[in-house]
Amino acid sequence: MEITVKHLTHIYQPNSPFERLALDDINVSIPFGKFITIIGHTGSGKSSFLQHLNGLLKPTKGEIIIGDHKIVADSKVKDLKSLRQRVGMVFQYPEHQLFEETVEKDIMFGPLNFGCTEDEARRRAREALEWVHLPESFLERSPFDLSGGQMRRVAIAGILAIRPEVLILDEPTAGLDPRGHREILDLFQWLNKEQGLTIIMVTHNMNDAALYSDEVMVMDKGRLVIKDRPEIVFSQRELLFDLGLDIPQTMHFLKRVSDKFGKDIVTPLFRLEETAHYVAQFLEKEKDGP
Amino acid sequence: MNETMIDIESLCFKYRNEDPDWILDHISLHVEAGEWLAITGHNGSGKSTLAKCLNGLLVPEQGSVKVKGFFTSDEDSLWEIRRSVGMVFQNPDNQFVGTTVRDDVAFGMENHGVPREEMVQRLSESLELVGMSEFQGQEPHRLSGGQKQRVAIAGIVALRPSIIILDEATSMLDPRGKSDVLKVMHELNKTRGITVISITHDLEEASSADRMIVMDEGRIVREGTPIDIFKEPEGLVEMGLDLPFTVKLRQLLIEENGLNLSEKAFTEKELVDELWKLQLNI
């Protein structure tokens, strides 16, 4: 299920003094099964873009084609329910939306809403809980007695139980400690690689964008500035700085090394191991002399 | 010796009587005027509960918390304590009351009965300090996350606090917002001597503190300068934390790549300098 966005423009409160251009002629296509991250400073249009992908916002101009669904300006979205079943959205702090007495009931809520039988919903709840790596014993617990990281997993399980093909995530790691952060990103990677879900994630963390995604979309003032592989996007240091963004830590370090040794090339590497290995080899070469 | 700002003696706290374990379990801690203290620990380790004890939002079940000599358990002192201790929270959108930046910064001062002339002067001074003067007349919701947090800080600074607590205050910000907020706070810490307590998961942020404490299961399990804490990384990762970038990279350079580096380098610059020397010596 490919996602194609053509000339997408969104204006908030048009024809009023508060009129604001949130998205400005965005054209992008996202093939099925990719892991895409979106970066951009606050107010660059990231969230507005996400909200178009499952019909929460409708374009002022342009269109969005998701599989056989088409969202265009000035007309009702057909089969909105089926679209939302296929495109699951995890908002910021999704744990704030937990409400049931037990974890099981909370996860079952989505599937039941989309017409599953009780038995099927229960089966999916078990499966989704396993996917987010929580033990079965949690099913009977109150979601409110869990830790922050666990609550977030339960909330995500609730979306996964709907069996979406595309998972949209708005800063899914905000507020988690380093372990919770890593575990939840590994989960998304697993869902992408092993379960074939398309992942579209907004993040402020440049390291995560570099490490986890097939492609990075950079947004600024409602426009899509670049969409490319992380190695290419993060090689554009000056551009990213101008947009209030940053480069991953590994590249900051490699830049320092390169400056110190009077070179002007910075190789785009994002993994620590690769970076350490590269630096060791670089020193070796320097030692042998030019 | 510097003036003592915060003095915690064997503080114990839990939210519900029937809970078997303390959320804060015999915490003792001293914070001096002008210090920058980082508090770190995994989710649920008790950091935020501790922060709420520092301005009397929560009071000790056992033990005591003293702020500038006032006990938080003494209701008559709460007003004074809350004026001295300002808090900046995680979500920039949840802490605005005014319709303009100016109104918002003035709100706290009005509440504290600051005379009008004084108020006008403090208003421009605090907005100046956080670099937000030109945004005075703007609506807060039109600002970026980092700008919102700086306005929140201005509102606190206007009350002339002795202590500012940052409760994960940069965790929702984009990279520039984050570095702007930290820059402003370091400035206030240095030039105005404001004591800063920063609760954070970000080990890079914690690294810039004078002193840090690590919490686990309601207890303080490590305490020292960031350099000392990260010198013994064992256990930190098991506690759900991470190590700063340079520490991890140095370990890999030594252990996996056989480089002869000292354990002294702590900042990126220091590490690069060591690599430079290493290459010259050989």
Image: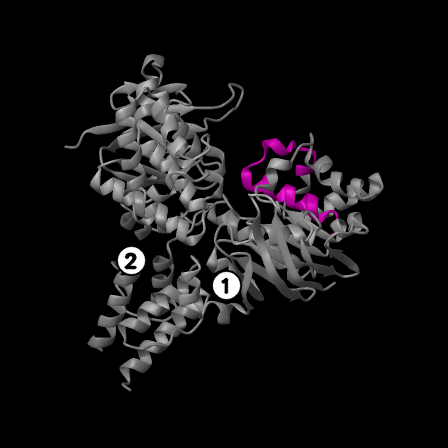
Q: Which residue is mark 1?
A: A210
Drawn side of residue A172 relative to residue B110, left or right: right
> What residue sits 76% from the left and 61% below the top?
A67
Q: Tell me the colour scheme of the image.
A: one colour
Residue B44 in picture, x, y percent from top left: 48, 36
Which x, y percent locates residue B270?
Answer: 25, 62
Disc 2 with disc 1 on a shared chain:
no
State how far apart marks 2 and 1 are (Cα): 22 Å
Q: Nearer the viewer, residue B177 or B265?
A: B177
Label number found at residue B267: 2
Left or right placement of residue A213 versus residue B212 in this view: right
Residue A191 as seen in the image, left or right of residue B167: right
Estimate the x, y position of residue A210 in percent, counting from the top left: 50, 63
Magenta run includes residue A127: no
Give the residues in magenta: A138-163
Mark 2, chain letter?
A: B
In the picture, residue A5 is in which quadrant?
bottom right
Res. A247 in view: no
